[in-house]
Image (cartoon, grey):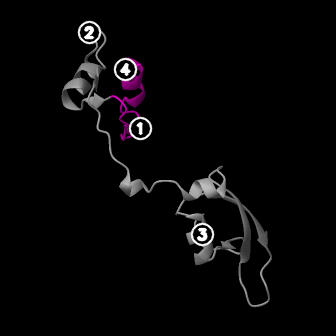
Amino acid sequence: HLLPGPEDIYVSQSQIRRFGLRTGDMVISQVRPPKETERYFGLLRVEAVNGLDPEAAKLRPKFERLIPIFPNQMLVLETKANILAPRLLDLIAPIGRGQRGLIVSPPKAGKTTILKQIA
């Protein structure tokens, strides 16, 4: 669940800036119990960010500033002339090398059959 709860840990803005923390980062750290006026555990020391040394994690490039590399080679799915599904995919929705895909379809529509024909 993503709602606030009593087991949440408070991370100060200065720690976020110091370690370059971003939404979704997995932080391994030491925490302290909340003081009388506090509601959450407090972050004491960051030991790792996403499995990396905190200093190395600070140097990660921002995703927004990365240069995209678009696929320039087509992945040909057609293998045999008598199997039509891969040929239709090549014609209607060509896939480039390195692309990711998502198959969205209701149950029992033939997703697994098409994947078997492609494989």
| First reached walking from the N terminus: tag 4 or tag 3 | 3
Position of the N terminus by quadrant: bottom right
- Magenta residues span 97-119
> In the rendered structure, which amino acid carries the disc numbered 3?
Arg
Residue 69 is situated, as x and y percent measured from the top left of the image, at 32, 39
Residue 21 is situated, as x and y percent measured from the top left of the image, at 56, 64
Which residue, given by chain and number where applicable, does mark 4 sit on?
118
Which residue, given by chain and number where applicable, does mark 3 sit on?
18
Task: Give 24 or 53, whichever is nearer the viewer.
Answer: 53
CB under 8 Å between discs 4 and 2? no
Main SS type for the magenta part? loop
Mark in front: 4 vs 3: 3
| First reached walking from the N terminus: tag 4 or tag 2 | 2
Which class describes the residues within 10 Å of circle 4: few (<14), some (14-19), or many (20+)?
Answer: some
Mark in front: 3 vs 1: 3
**Disc 2 element:** loop
> In the rendered structure, which amino acid carries the disc numbered 2?
Asn
Residue 82 tag number: 2
Task: Give 15 or 24, whichever is nearer the viewer.
Answer: 15
**Disc 1 element:** loop
Mark in front: 2 vs 3: 3
Q: Quadrant of residue 47?
A: bottom right
Mark in front: 1 vs 4: 4
